[in-house]
Image (spheres, coloured by chain):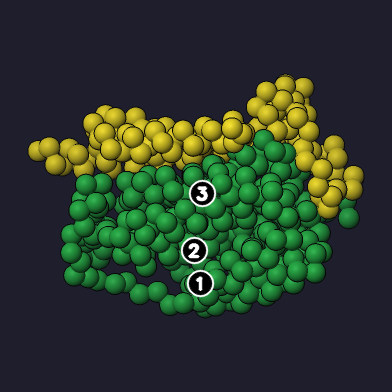
Amino acid sequence: MNIFDASTLIFLISISAGFLGAITGLGGGVVIIPVLTILFGVDIRYAIGASLVSVIATSSGAAAAYVKEGFTNIRIGMFLEIATTLGALVGAVLATIVSTSAIAVIFGIVLVYSAGQSIQPRRERSGDIRPDKLAQMLRMNSTYPSPEGAKAYFVERIPGGLGIMMTAGILSGLLGTGSGAFKVLAMDQVMRIPFKVSTTTSNFMIGVTAAASAGVYLNRGYVDPGLAMPVMLGALLGSLLGTKVLVRAPVQRLRMVFGVVILVLAIEMIYNGITGSI
Amino acid sequence: MPETDAALSEQRLKAFLGNLLRAGVIVAGVIVMLGGALYLIRHGDATPEYRIFRGEPVELKTVGGIISGVISLRARAIIQLGLLLLIFTPVARVALSLYAFAVQRDRVYVAVTLFVLGILIFSLAGGRV
């Protein structure tokens, strides 16, 4: 296979990964990295570098639309980025130390978790929440648009959220994904932020988190332009298509399919990591 | 009414941030596409070597190296310039938020944003102590 054929194939795979990633909210990286390493035999460090830059493209592209809709909470995002960018920096430096086999195994474990998250049904919680002093001081409480007009929400347990965000940042920097699943976990489950606000704010944060580790990757020579080009363009195109059809798509069923796909990839990654072939 | 003014400026800020992100991605995407086309025309028949990790040469991992590569129209350097702009897009978003929070005299968030911006700049400088 020459560069032209390989680039075309990687471009097509990245389109589908970006498409599914946008619909399920998990991002394309969780598919792109295993496919590149397992199917194409790409060194995992190049795969991570390529995925990381495409993560910035897809999340920024989608964020532009979400921010205008009024779900994204810029203050919550900005504040939590303290933890994700710090974590991302740590993760990127770790990636240069930890062996590629260990990265593959960690990647697989994180994939299993993400698959579980994507299969789980979502429900909005409504709540009687006591006012949190820190959230008031940080002006995080806000409203989001709903069919019945603007709905108020209150944020709580900020330190716990920060802790998980730090982990999300480390994983993002180490594995080259957006780790949206962990960001949503921190906001939705721990900080009790409405699901729609959590997912859009998570997406808003992913670009900054990824940029914090991308600088390190670029400087260490982990970003190969020949490989990153089809990955970034494909993932961007796919995610744009994904956000376009999101309203009409059978999201629940797609989540199931995507969950199964990444579960299979996860097992492959763990197996290859343990046997040392990655 | 100050409240609606604040809400309006918040809405305008969001619209502006959104447009900035979109513009950054579009410009980066177009540059990567141009560099990619050139790369495939010139090197499309060659065999890809992504299996063995060697790390990129200095011309492709520093801002100075990338720019001099672009000037001599090297395809890989042009792609890398697009990727560099892409990485700068969220950084520009943070810088712009810093300005917006400063205008609103929101000291807490000016501090928060400065911290995040500091980490990003440190990372872009290579993340070395």
Percent across and percent down for residue A247 are 43, 66
Name which residue type carries label 2.
Answer: Ala
Question: The disc labelled 1 sits on which kind of residue?
Answer: Ser
Tell me whether circle 3 and circle 1 mark residues in contact (CB < 8 Å). no
Q: Position of residue B49 (x, y in %)?
A: 85, 48
Name the residue located 26 percent from the left edge and 63 percent from the top edge: A146
Q: Are marks 3 and 2 on the same chain?
A: yes
Identify residue for label 1. Answer: A118
* Above or below: residue B5 compared with residue A1: above
The residue to which callout 2 is attached is: A181
Question: Pointer 1 indicates a residue of which chain?
Answer: A
- Compare marks 3 and 1 and give the one earlier in the sequence: 3
At x 73%, y 49%, the residue is A46
Left or right of residue A205, residue A74 in this image: left
Residue receiving disc 3: A87
The colour applied to the residues of chain B in this rendering is yellow
Q: Which mark is residue A19?
A: none
